[in-house]
Image (cartoon, grey):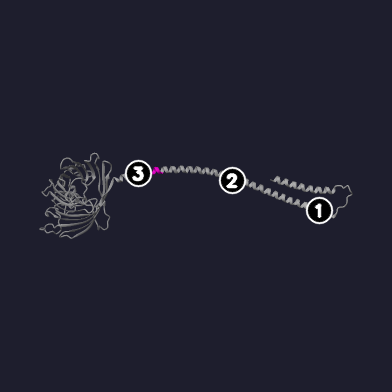
């Protein structure tokens, strides 16, 4: 571009100088004639021409200068454009590198995301599996227990009336451990260390916290292929037929028991035959090397045999015979004297005092029960009759018999069920160990007791009940008889009326 501008300028300059040279040549050309002097007009015209040409030359110089400036600016612009192009090319290269790096990062991120998703899926599957395992274990168990609120007024002549509010809480779980084992664990309120027959606590003890302890903890082995056999160990509810006359309903013995039960479907009226073995430990003597027979641990060995018979379509009766031998029972009365065993008052005959105290009798329960259920014409009102007779052949006196009879109509299973009943008990002084039977009676032994009750279920898991215990001491002249203070010697023990209004919610 610069070369073109220079060429144009040279051409213009050459043309201008050629015009001037031609004019001068024409002036200096010799004339063939005698030269004459130039006129003023010619000189003036010549000067005008020269001036015009000079102006044209200056104009060309100005144009050339402008062209040279424009060329310089163009070259500078071209250099800037080239620099910008090179910079753009470098930026493009950098951008391409960045894009490539970004693509690699995206690929890595995608791979990491896929890997994380896979790990998350594996973790989720593992978590779901663990949750299913835990849920499977939880589903094998169910809650057990109840809470009972009780208002209990007590009346007896010669003694002040008493009114107390009581609460019982029992809560636990039971269920299958696997195909062949099941078990249970239950906590209950009450005086946990030294009262085996009550799970109540009384309100009004200065707002104190109430004790709670293990009431049940056992495992039972019952193979799936042999349902007729079961072996139980721990602290468990009795698996044999009994009545309150010799074991309190709240008492859960400790030790072991075995049961063989055979359902007979094709033998006429005999429907079931069962045998139960019992090995109950009620006191363990630490550090003693003495055998049981010479004063070691206190245990009760025995068993029960039962048969269930069906007479027609409406009457079913279970007959049960029990033998239970209490070995080293003197540890019980010694614990009561030392105040390390609470619960029932002692009404058995005793010998000695202080640390040398012992029972006058030994205890062997020979118990016979007949438990009959009659289906009436009202399905919700079956009739149940229970008769229990117990003899203690090892008693030191003839005060060794116990009788319990009970009749109940109705049931307590479903919503709006109603049940009412009556029980009568006559328990002589040394028929049973006083520490372990029904705690709601006037006295555990040497007692004549009546019981009236009615209960209604407004909901399937809620029971409203009323119970009236009416009892008195059987023979006021026997040792350890329970009597009100100041009772005249000629007067019989007045009846104690213990009323219980209960609201029971079952888990």
Find out whether residue 133 is within the magenta segment. no
Foreground residue among 306 and 343: 306
**Whether residue 66 is visible:** yes
Residue 234 at what x, y percent from top left?
24, 44
Residue under label 1, please give it.
Answer: 47
Residue span colored magenta:
120-126
Number of the label disc, if any, that sits on residue 88: 2
Question: Which image quadrant is residue 290 in?
Answer: top left
- Residue neighbourhood size for the residue with mark 3, other residues' Cα within 10 Å, grouped as few (<14), some (14–19), many (≥20): few
- Foreground of the two, 193 or 88: 88
For label 1, the SS is helix
Image spot of residue 335 (x, y percent): 20, 49
C-alpha distance separating marks 2 and 1: 59 Å
Which structural element holds mark 2?
A: helix
Q: Which mark is residue 130?
A: 3
Magenta stretch: residue 125 in it? Answer: yes
Q: In the image, is residue 126 above or below residue 36? A: above
Q: Earlier in the sequence, mark 2 or mark 1?
A: 1
Residue 320 seen in render: no
Q: Quadrant of the N terminus?
A: top right
Q: In terms of sequence position, does the residue under pointer 2 or pointer 3 come before the other?
A: 2
Marking on residue 309: none
What is the C-alpha distance between the residues marked 2 and 3? 60 Å
Q: In which quadrant of the rendered view does residue 455 lie? A: bottom left
Q: In the figure, residue 307 lies in which quadrant?
A: top left
Between label 2 and label 3, give the one nearer the viewer. 2
Lower sequence index among marks 1 and 3 = 1
């Amino acid at each position: 571009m610069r070369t073109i501008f220079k060429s144009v300028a040279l051409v213009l300059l050459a043309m201008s100088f050629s015009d001037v040279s031609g004019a001068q040549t024409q002036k200096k050309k010799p004339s063939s004639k005698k030269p004459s002097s130039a006129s003023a007009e010619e000189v003036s015209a010549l000067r005008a021409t020269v001036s015009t040409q000079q102006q044209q030359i200056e104009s060309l110089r100005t144009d050339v200068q402008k062209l040279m400036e424009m060329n310089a600016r163009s070259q500078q612009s071209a250099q800037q454009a080239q620099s910008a192009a090179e910079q753009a090319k470098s930026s493009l290269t950098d951008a391409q590198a960045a894009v490539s790096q970004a693509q690699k990062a995206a690929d890595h991120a995608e791979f990491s995301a896929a890997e994380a998703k896979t790990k998350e899926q594996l973790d989720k599957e593992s978590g779901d599996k663990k949750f299913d395992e835990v849920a499977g274990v939880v589903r094998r168990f169910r809650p057990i227990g109840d809470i009972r609120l009780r208002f209990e007024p007590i009346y007896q002549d010669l003694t002040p009336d008493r009114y107390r509010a009581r609460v019982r809480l029992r809560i636990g779980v039971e269920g299958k451990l696997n195909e062949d084992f099941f078990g249970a664990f239950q906590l209950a309120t009450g005086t946990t260390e030294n009262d085996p027959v009550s799970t109540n606590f009384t309100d009004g003890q200065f707002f104190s916290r109430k004790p709670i302890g293990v009431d049940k903890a056992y495992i039972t082995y019952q193979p799936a292929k042999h349902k007729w056999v079961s072996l139980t160990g721990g602290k468990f509810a009795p698996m044999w037929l009994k009545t309150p006359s010799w074991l309190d309903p709240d008492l859960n013995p400790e030790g072991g028991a075995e049961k063989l039960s055979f359902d007979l479907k094709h033998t006429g009226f005999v429907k079931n035959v069962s045998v139960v073995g019992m090995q109950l430990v009620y006191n363990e003597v630490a550090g003693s090397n003495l055998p049981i027979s010479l004063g070691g641990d206190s245990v009760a060995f025995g068993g029960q045999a039962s048969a269930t018979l069906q007479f027609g379509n409406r009457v079913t009766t279970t007959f049960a015979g029990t033998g239970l031998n209490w070995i080293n029972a003197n540890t019980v009365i010694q614990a009561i004297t030392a105040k390390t065993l609470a619960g029932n008052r002692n009404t058995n005959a005793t010998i000695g005092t202080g640390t040398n105290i012992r029972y006058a009798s030994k205890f062997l329960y020979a118990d016979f029960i007949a438990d009959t259920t009659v289906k009436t014409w009202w399905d919700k009102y079956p009739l149940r009759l229970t008769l229990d007779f117990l003899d203690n052949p090892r008693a030191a006196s003839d005060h060794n018999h116990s009788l319990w009879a009970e009749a109940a109509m109705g049931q307590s299973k479903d919503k709006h069920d109603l049940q009412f009943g009556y029980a009568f008990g006559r328990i002589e002084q040394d028929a049973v160990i006083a520490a372990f039977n029904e705690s709601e009676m006037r006295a555990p032994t040497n007692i004549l007791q009546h019981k009236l009750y009615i209960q209604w279920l407004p909901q399937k898991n809620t029971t409203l009940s009323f119970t009236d215990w009416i009892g008195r001491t059987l023979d006021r002249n026997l040792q350890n008889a329970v009597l009100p203070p100041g009772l005249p010697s000629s007067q019989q023990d007045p009846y104690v009326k213990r009323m219980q209004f209960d609201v029971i919610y079952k888990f």
